[in-house]
Amino acid sequence: MSDILATENCPTRSKPFNTPYCPNCGERRLTEKDSSITILVGDALSFLLESDGKLIRSIKTFVLKPGKYVQEYVGGARKKYISPIKLFLIANAFYFFFPVFDTFKTTLNTQLHRLLQSDLTYDFIQAQIATSGMEYEAYQLQYDEVTTVISKAILIILPFLFGGLTLLLNLSSRKIKPLLHHFNYSFTLYAFMIFFGISAVPGLYMLIADLTNSELMIQGITEISTTVYLTLLLNVFGFFLYRNFFSGSKAMNGFKWLLLNFLFIPLMQLYRFILLFFTLGWMKLFN
């Protein structure tokens, strides 16, 4: 009879079963379709639509109502949404493969001459170049290639640093809003910045510029315009994300957000300082 299945051992529990699903752990019996290349598409779609559209719902609320998304998640809505750190990792993966603005990349020339800590690290970097036995141009080329990859791999450092800053500005509420809450908000903010700020939106802009062959649009992308664009985008999104987060009056909350804007500069300097040592360490170990 065609409905009678041969007995097989469960690949997970190693126990025999002769039903479509293992009665012990629920593992599904493989069929010929599971050997088809189309299974990849099915797996991708099932991930996007799993748990009744959990990912889609999370992204929709994250974009349109970021404050509600994080408040409900930290309040216990784990079946309804994926976690902020997962959103961040998805955004970071997208940025890893489709970088438009290399905002977090820091070249050797920048490390040597253009950062606040360059005077402190200059002699150390030069000593590393000398001990490598390479000419400066060759070392610079290799450094810039390595740091481009590492700058994306260690981006997770930034949300932790920013979460620490928001905790310091909200110490009076640390009992009801512990450090983990701050990290969840921070991961949400950086997921938005990475996906929309430096990947999707600039990518769409560049696509339109290429399709219309607009030199004016391409020339409009400068360091100043990029900084202004990212600052405005983050502050608009940050307003809706953090508007009910900080304790105190509206004036005090406004001051705290303004202070975070200023503290973002030394935070980025600290990230680039950490990036320097990760890059130098990698080159010393693997090159």
Image (tube, grey):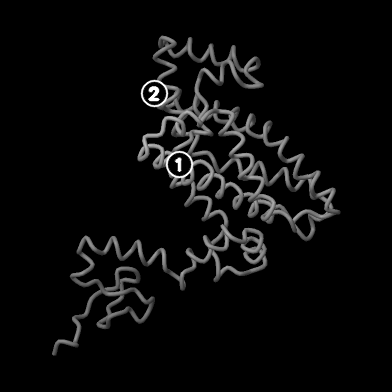
2 vs 1, front mark: 1
Mark 1 Cα shell of 10 Å, populated few (<14), some (14-19), many (≥20) = some
- Counting residues from the N terminus, which is met first, the one under dot 2 or under dot 1? 1
Label 2: few (<14), some or many (≥20) within 10 Å?
A: few
Report the side of 156 relative to 213 (left or right): right
- In the image, 80 versus 196, the foreground residue is 196
Quarter of the figure with the N terminus: bottom left
> Mark 1 sits on what residue?
205
At label 2, the amino acid type is: Asn
The disc label shown at residue 106, or none = none
- Distance, label 2 to label 1, CA atoms, is 37 Å
Q: Residue at x 40, y 42 (%)?
A: 208
The residue positioned 75% from the left and 58% from the top of the image is: 244
Count of numbered badges drawn on the protein: 2
Measuring from the top left, give residue 170's x and y in whole percent. 79, 50
Callout 2: helix, strand or loop?
loop
Residue placed under numbered mark 2 in the picture: 287
Q: Nearer the viewer, residue 166 or 60?
A: 60
Residue drawn at 59 percent across, 12 percent down: 123
Say whether residue 245 is left or right of residue 70.
Answer: right
| Callout 2 touching callout 1 (CB < 8 Å) | no
Task: Indicate the amino acid at tag 1.
Answer: Tyr
